[in-house]
Amino acid sequence: MINAEELIMENLKYKVENTGLSGDMGIELIYAKDGQAKGRMKIEDKHMNVNGTIHGGSFFTLADMIAGCAVCSIWDKIATVNSSIEFMRTSKKSEYITCVANVGKNGKNLIWTTAKIYDDNNLLLCEYKALYYRLEKE
């Protein structure tokens, strides 16, 4: 029998990998549990910019999806209030980029998250921060 945590993970994994922009981008959800999530994206030509490096929008999409999964592992209905990303460096040669996200503060109405994206050599490429609003559960 599947427990509630496994059901949440299964549902999030399906949504991330098979629907919308995240499905088109090839994002994989590795885990989402207790306010933490990890995912990755295999780098393809469609993820690159005109300079031959990973496009900032590719980083942002991965971070946004995985941070959202960290939040949805503890509260299923959210809306983004604000988000930002800071780029430290980019990569030309990484096969995958991996994102690790954590809920920093789980407030009554607002949830703060951070996410970091690394290349194959575990080199930090960027940091993402987001604030989410709790929506009413149906």
Image: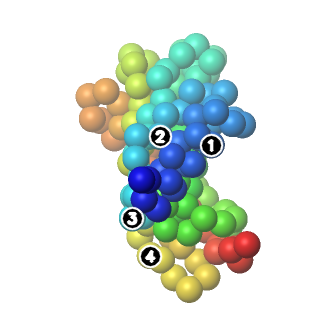
Indicate which disc residue 34 carries. Answer: 3
- Residues 57 and 136: in front is 136
Which sits earlier in the primary sequence, circle 2 or circle 1?
1
Quarter holding residue 114: bottom left
Question: Which residue is identified by label 1?
Answer: 15
Spatial separation of the CA atoms under disc 3 and disc 2: 15 Å
Question: Which residue is identified by label 2?
Answer: 29
Q: Tell me the amino acid under the disc marked 3.
A: Asp
Which sits earlier in the primary sequence, circle 3 or circle 2?
2
Which sits earlier in the primary sequence, circle 4 or circle 1?
1
- Residues 19 and 113: in front is 19
Spatial separation of the CA atoms under disc 4 and disc 2: 22 Å
Q: Are marks 2 and 1 in contact (CB under 8 Å)?
A: no
- Residues 110 and 16: in front is 16
Question: Which residue is identified by label 4?
Answer: 105
Where in the figure is residue 51, as x and y percent of width and height? 57, 17
Which sits earlier in the primary sequence, circle 3 or circle 4?
3
Q: Tell me the amino acid under the disc marked 4.
A: Lys
Q: Tell me the amino acid under the disc marked 1.
A: Lys
SS assignment at label 3: loop
Which sits earlier in the primary sequence, circle 3 or circle 1?
1
**Eye-nearest disc, 4 or 2:** 2
